[in-house]
Image (cartoon, helix red, strand yellow):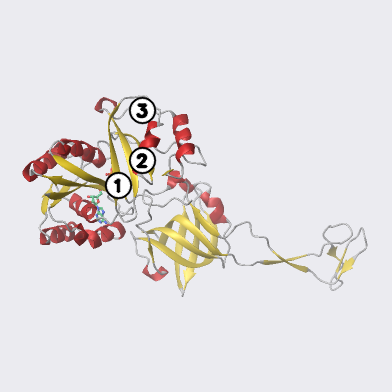
């Protein structure tokens, strides 16, 4: 019998990780069932109450002992949830059917909008799912969305976990081994190292049970890459997840007027207010289209990406990619920037002397220009097209500032 098990909202910033729970549960279920797929599904990255990366999990199993599969799941949630933390509200959904696509449109809503627990429960109940909730049960949203996730486009993440006695202690990972792995396996793996800072990105900084996670395009590429990592502590267990990370699944093309807070958009427009650098190093500009405008921000953590943004000038046509936030104005928090068309700029300059190559001086009002040295003259200023330092194309924030869902460029 086929069973989909969706789980979410079990961890806190201080302890545990829903993927760890899935890894342990997968092993327990494998003792009497066939675990066909373990998914890590990232949902709306703009949700204010997420713990970290708004991830939910789903295990797809074939089992001959349905009651035991369910009780093992509920026991694992009891064992590996940080229920004492205020913001931890676990939810589990069991779906026994063979049409998880019934929940696909809900997945897309949970990926791109803000949905309610009541929405999730109503849909789950209508389709014969069994729901379990702890505290306010908000995890039911992610649990159902993970069952319905459309992973037509997908990547993989191979995660190595620490033994409990190491949780919260400094991770000892040989950085050079990660850099060598990155050189050997990129682009089949991605976001291992930040090219701007050489910072290692495979290890989280939180006290969770993850030692490292390697993201890549195939199961083989991430498993092979993992063998190249030098770890200074024992690995308790590993797990392979099929995921929507690195696919841009959260982004929706729309016009400026339809960009809503907490959604993630791709909008096109012309630069209507040139980039300004604010205190703290954040760079802000505005784009407009059909009389509507929206602010776009490249925040300080986006590092060298801001240098590209600063080269924009009024009139340039761009596509901006990112999450929409309502602060004072609606603002797109930039994940990517596509420079579609560069505005031509003409600058007036004093003429150049053909003799010595220097700039001529004014010869007096209405008298034209002259070169004092060579005694050459010219009647009027020259109009020169400004060479733009920026090129058309797609630019992305550095991997250290990237969202889990963002597709790496290249
Ligand atoms: P981690 O990545 O460590 O698992 P997290 O960042 O996934 O943590 P959660 O603890 O899972 O954070 O909390 C996110 C909560 O938000 C969950 O309860 C989930 O069901 C809910 N949620 C997810 N997507 C949406 C959405 N689109 N609208 C409303 N709630 C959502």
Q: Is mark 1 on a helix, strand or loop?
A: strand
Residue beneath label 2, please? Answer: 220
User: Does label 1 or label 3 sit earlier along the sequence?
Assistant: 3
Q: Nearer the viewer, mark 2 or mark 3?
A: 2
**Vertical side of 379 occupied by 274: above or below:** above
Task: Measure the C-alpha gap from mark 1 to mark 2.
Answer: 12 Å
Residue 372 location, x and y as percent?
91, 60
* Along the line of sight, the residue nearer the viewer: 9 or 253: 253
Q: Is mark 3 on a helix, strand or loop?
A: loop
**Mark drawn on residue 373:** none
User: Does label 1 or label 2 sit earlier along the sequence?
Assistant: 2
Q: Please report the residue visible at 18 percent of the width from the left and 56 percent of the height from the top.
A: 117
Residue 286 location, x and y as percent?
49, 63
- Asked which quadrant contains residue 253, the reply is bottom left
Q: Say left or right for 127 vs 315.
A: left
Mark 1: C-beta under 8 Å from nearest atom of ligand 1: no
Task: Measure the C-alpha gap from mark 2 to mark 3.
Answer: 29 Å
> Mark 1 Cα within 10 Å, few/some/many (few <14, many 20+)?
many
Q: Say left or right for 152 vs 390.
A: left
Residue 82 visible at all: no
**Mark drawn on residue 170:** 3
User: Does label 2 or label 3 sit earlier along the sequence?
Assistant: 3
Residue 197 location, x and y as percent?
51, 39
Q: Say left or right for 372 vs 136.
A: right
């Amino acid at each position: 019998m086929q069973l989909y098990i969706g789980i979410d909202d079990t961890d806190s910033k201080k302890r545990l990780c829903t993927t760890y729970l899935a890894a342990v549960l997968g092993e327990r279920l494998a003792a009497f069932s066939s675990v066909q797929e373990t998914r890590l599904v990232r949902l709306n990255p703009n949700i204010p109450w997420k713990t970290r990366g708004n991830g939910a999990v789903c295990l797809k199993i074939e089992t001959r002992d349905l009651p035991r599969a369910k009780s093992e799941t509920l026991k694992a949630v009891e064992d590996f949830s940080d229920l004492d933390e205020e913001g931890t509200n676990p939810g589990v959904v069991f779906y026994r059917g063979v049409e998880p696509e019934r929940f696909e449109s809900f997945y897309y809503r949970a990926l791109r909008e803000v949905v309610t627990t009541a929405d999730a429960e109503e849909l789950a109940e209508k389709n014969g799912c069994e729901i379990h909730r702890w505290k306010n049960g908000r995890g039911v949203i992610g649990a159902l969305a993970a069952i319905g996730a459309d992973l037509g486009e997908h990547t993989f993440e191979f995660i190595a976990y620490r033994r409990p006695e190491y949780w919260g202690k400094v991770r000892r990972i040989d950085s050079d081994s990660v850099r060598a792995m990155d050189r050997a396996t990129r682009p089949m793996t991605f976001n291992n190292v930040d090219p701007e800072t050489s910072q290692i990105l495979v290890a989280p900084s939180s006290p969770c049970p993850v030692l490292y996670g390697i993201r890549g395009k195939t199961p083989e590429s991430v498993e092979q890459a993992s063998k190249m990592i030098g770890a200074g502590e024992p690995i308790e267990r590993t797990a392979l997840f099929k995921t929507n990370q690195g696919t841009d699944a959260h982004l929706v093309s729309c016009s400026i007027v339809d960009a809503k807070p907490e959604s993630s958009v791709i909008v096109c427009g012309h630069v209507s207010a040139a980039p300004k650098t604010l205190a703290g190093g954040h760079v802000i500009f505005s784009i407009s289209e059909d009389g509507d405008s929206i602010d776009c921000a490249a925040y300080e953590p986006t590092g060298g990406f801001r240098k590209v943004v600063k080269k924009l000038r009024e009139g340039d046509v761009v596509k901006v990619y990112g999450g929409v936030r309502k602060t004072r104005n609606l603002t797109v928090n930039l994940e990517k920037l596509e420079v579609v068309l560069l505005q031509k700029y003409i600058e007036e300059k004093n003429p150049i002397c053909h003799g010595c190559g220097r700039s001529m001086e004014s010869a007096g009002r209405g008298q034209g220009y002259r070169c004092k040295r060579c005694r050459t003259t010219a009647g009027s200023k020259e109009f020169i097209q400004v060479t733009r330092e920026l090129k058309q194309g797609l630019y992305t924030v550095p991997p250290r500032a990237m969202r889990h869902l963002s597709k790496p460029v290249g």
